[in-house]
Image (cartoon, rainbow, N blue to C red):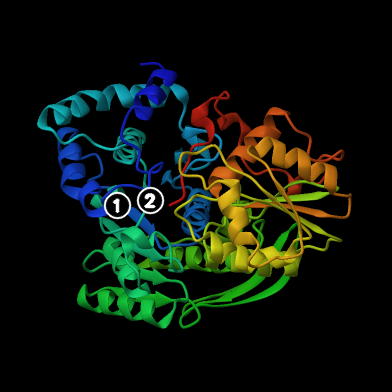
């Protein structure tokens, strides 16, 4: 296969990332994934895996852990989803995305097993195949560690065939309630499905109902449990558009004046969880020096999350996709950014809590531009508008049916002292970044000047423009 052949084949598979009409327990089956792996020699076996589950911040935590371990000199396989601009972003060794030739080669290796499973009547899904591609690639690369981000849930997720030695549970909140459950306890049960017997669990600060499930799971599986704000304490010293500085106290060490590029208090929390992962490796014979941890945090990057992509006017993209994420986004905007007016470009998937997101952030906006990302799951502008008027009865509202038109409309309305915020969906963020990177739309007459503000995506990892470039889905 060529690279394009491989992407075309992937697009022919059942892609639950794009759909909202499937049976969770029937469609996500670990037995199918285990059979798939067995046909390929169980490439996931023998890997030192760190598994990241939860609702918010999974990708950021994974990125921080990857950066710390890479800085320490280890060969690290990082698997995340969805991608923003290129499929290749999903599978990395350290900071290097998988090459086009390796994507094609790995798919060639996988294809006979896929054909066999088709004959057996148990065809893997798009996400199954992506996950197996990562395992095959990491086996070839002889990585020292794999850092795996859960796609959805955890218990039935394709990544959960891995024998992880550390499980991280990021903040759990309401999302995918149609599949994971209507209560926080039910959702937490699915998220905690990644925890393996006798391993280490590291948790963010959680709602009491969630913490109860995590604690009980850790006890029943004889796991050590580290919890933020109980065993880890941080103090933020400075937050600005250039990044954040903070100190961290753990049970065994004090870290002073750590710096990260990522914005928002929640990213400091994510960084703290990553440090806890590094410390949890000590009993396993992996000792990472404080200065290495500090350097690894400073180098970590994760595009599309509270990222400044232009100035004058300041333009920010963020993949907030539920009410809790929108609340954190609002807090970060008020803390970090100064602006005269906020112009909000909003689009979301139809199965998301649009009401909850708009309730959190719409009151910041003087203008809301409602749009529809290029996805079958995207809510229509009319549907979003119907929800918006409940929270903003007197507001300047523009509706568009394309993200490009939304960006053009924002550019016409915004002055150099205003802030343009593009949020509501990673689909929306990906498409906006794609449009701006292609030069189809100029968000601002002044490009970014400060290197600290430049987009953190490795542009060498971008695919040439196609419909595949920005179809990554909410998790």
Task: Tell me what residue is drawn at x 41 percent, y 25 percent.
Answer: 7
Disc on the earlier residue, 2 or 1:
2
Measured as percent of width and height from the top left, residue 58 is found at 46, 58
Q: Quadrant of residue 451?
A: top right
As drawn, the residue found furthest toward the top would be 1
Badge 1, how many Cα within 10 Å: few under 14, some, many 20+? Answer: many
Q: Nearer the viewer, residue 236 or 354?
A: 354
Task: Tell me what residue is drawn at x 62 percent, y 68 percent.
Answer: 360
Task: Please tell me the numbered disc located at residue 157.
Answer: 1
Task: Tell me what residue is drawn at x 31 percent, y 52 percent.
Answer: 48
92 to the left or right of 284: right
Task: Please tell me the numbered disc located at residue 371.
Answer: none
417 to the left or right of 36: right
Q: CA distance from mark 2 to mark 1?
A: 6 Å
Asked if labels 1 and 2 touch by Cβ distance under 8 angstroms, the answer is: yes
As drawn, the residue found furthest toward the left would be 120
As drawn, the residue found furthest toward the right would be 416
Measured as percent of width and height from the top left, residue 177 is found at 37, 63
**Residue with the mark numbered 2:** 151
Q: Nearer the viewer, residue 66 or 391?
A: 391
**Residue 446 seen in the figure:** yes
């Amino acid at each position: 296969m060529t690279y394009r052949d491989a992407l075309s084949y992937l697009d022919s598979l059942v892609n639950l990332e794009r759909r909202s009409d499937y049976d969770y327990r029937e469609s996500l089956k670990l037995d199918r994934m285990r059979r798939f792996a067995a046909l390929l020699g169980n490439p996931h076996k023998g890997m030192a895996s760190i598994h990241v589950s939860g609702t918010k911040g999974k990708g950021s935590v994974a990125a921080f852990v990857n950066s710390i371990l890479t800085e320490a000199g280890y060969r690290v396989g990082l698997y995340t989803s969805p991608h923003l601009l290129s499929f290749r972003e999903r599978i990395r060794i350290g900071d290097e995305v998988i090459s086009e030739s390796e994507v094609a080669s790995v798919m060639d290796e996988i294809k006979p097993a896929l054909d066999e499973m088709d004959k057996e009547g148990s065809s893997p899904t798009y996400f199954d195949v992506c996950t197996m591609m990562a395992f095959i690639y990491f086996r070839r690369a002889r990585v020292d560690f794999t850092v795996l981000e859960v796609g959805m849930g955890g218990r039935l997720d394709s990544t959960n065939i891995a024998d992880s030695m550390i499980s991280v549970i990021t903040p759990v909140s309401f999302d995918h309630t149609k599949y994971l459950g209507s209560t926080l306890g039910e959702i937490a049960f699915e998220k905690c499905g990644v925890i393996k017997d006798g391993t280490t669990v590291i948790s963010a600060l959680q709602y009491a109902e969630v913490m109860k499930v995590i604690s009980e799971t850790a006890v029943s599986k004889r796991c050590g449990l580290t919890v933020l704000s109980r065993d880890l304490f941080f103090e933020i010293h400075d937050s600005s558009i250039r990044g954040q500085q903070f100190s961290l106290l753990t049970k065994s060490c004090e870290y002073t004046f750590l710096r990260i590029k990522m914005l928002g208090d929640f990213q400091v929390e994510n960084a703290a969880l990553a440090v806890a992962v590094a410390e949890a490796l000590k009993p396993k014979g992996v000792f990472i020096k404080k200065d290495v941890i500090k350097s690894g945090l400073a180098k970590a990057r994760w595009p599309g999350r509270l990222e400044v992509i232009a100035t004058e006017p300041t333009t920010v993209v963020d993949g907030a996709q539920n009410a809790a994420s929108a609340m954190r986004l609002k807090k970060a905007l008020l803390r970090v950014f100064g602006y005269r007016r906020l112009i909000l470009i909003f689009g979301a998937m139809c199965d998301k809590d649009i009401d909850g997101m708009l309730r959190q952030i719409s009151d910041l906006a003087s203008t809301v531009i409602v749009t529809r990302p290029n996805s079958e799951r995207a809510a229509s502008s009319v549907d979003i508008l119907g929800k918006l008027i409940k929270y903003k009865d007197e507001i300047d509202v523009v509706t568009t049916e394309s993200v490009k038109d939304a960006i053009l409309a924002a550019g016409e309305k915004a002055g150099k002292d205003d802030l343009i915020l593009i949020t509501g969906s990673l689909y929306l963020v990906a498409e906006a970044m794609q449009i701006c990177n292609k030069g189809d739309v100029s968000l601002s007459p002044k490009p970014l000047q400060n290197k600290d503000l430049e987009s953190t995506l490795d542009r060498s990892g971008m695919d040439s423009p196609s419909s595949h470039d920005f179809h990554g889905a909410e998790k």
